[in-house]
Image: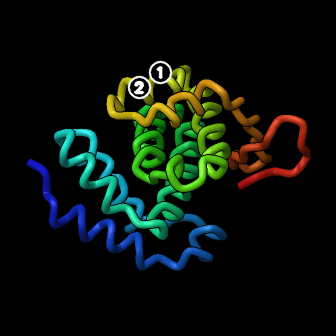
């Protein structure tokens, strides 16, 4: 059964995050847990409830969700985890970034495509399987975006880089 109150509280917590800190240091573990909860609830919700959840995501929450997407892509690469990949796909869909400014979706989509390739899964196919309500615009973006290059440093940390650039994007 869908827990609307907890979903609302989780989305409120995303709105209260310091966006500068999220962009510089990533998403805190307690917020990560809340996003994982929302993703799990979203996956099992009815079509009407899914629509309601997506409407409740603010623009501030979108920024936090995109930080979570990057972290899930990194985790998918490090652990070869299709679960992390699927959570990243759901969070990207929940972020509504494709409806706000599709140009901001290129990097997260490229990260997820690279993570999917590393996990042995096709991220665009997984997105369609996991998200039957996937936006056609986002689905086409998965087919039109090149995966980013995965770079590992000596400590095993993962970074994503656009092909043909020398600067790492973390």
Q: How crowded is mark 1: few (under 14 residues within 10 Å), some or many (20 or more)?
A: some
- Left or right: 161 in relation to 74: right
- The quarter holding residue 77 reads top right
How far is mark 2 from mark 1, CA to CA?
Answer: 5 Å
- Residue 102 is labelled as none
Name the residue located 56 percent from the left edge and 28 percent from the top edge. Answer: 140
Task: Tell me the element at label 2.
Answer: helix
Circle on res. 128: 2
Q: Do the residues labelled 2 and 1 touch (CB within 8 Å)?
A: yes
**Residue 27 vs residue 101: left or right?**
left
Identify the residue under disc 1. 125
Q: Can residue 28 be seen from the camera position used here?
A: no
Between 71 and 141, which is closer to the camera in this rendering? Answer: 141
Residue for point 19% across, 48% down: 49
Q: What element carries label 1?
A: helix
Q: Residues within 10 Å of mark 2 (few under 14, many from 20)?
A: some
Apparent side of residue 116 relative to residue 144 in the rendered image (left or right):
left
Which residue appears at 76% of the width and 52% of the height?
Answer: 169
Residue at (40% x, 50% y) in the render: 94
Q: Where is residue 157 in the image (x, y as percent from the top left)?
A: 69, 49
Quarter of the picture holding the C terminus: bottom right
């Amino acid at each position: 059964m869908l827990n609307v109150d907890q979903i609302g509280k989780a989305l409120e917590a995303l709105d209260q995050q310091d966006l500068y800190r999220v962009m510089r240091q990533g998403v805190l573990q307690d917020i990560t847990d809340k996003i994982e909860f929302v993703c799990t609830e979203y996956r099992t919700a009815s079509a009407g409830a899914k629509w309601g959840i997506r409407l409740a995501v603010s623009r501030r929450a979108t920024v936090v969700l995109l930080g979570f997407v990057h972290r899930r892509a990194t985790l998918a690469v490090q652990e070869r985890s299709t679960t992390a990949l699927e959570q990243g796909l759901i969070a990207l869909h929940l972020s509504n970034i494709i409806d706000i400014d599709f140009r901001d979706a290129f990097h997260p989509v490229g990260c997820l495509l690279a993570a999917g390739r590393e996990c042995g899964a096709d991220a665009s196919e997984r997105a369609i399987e996991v998200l039957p309500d996937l936006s056609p615009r986002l689905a086409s973006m998965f087919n039109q975006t090149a995966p980013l290059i995965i770079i590992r440093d000596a400590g095993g940390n993962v970074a994503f880089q656009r092909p043909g650039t020398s600067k790492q994007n973390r």
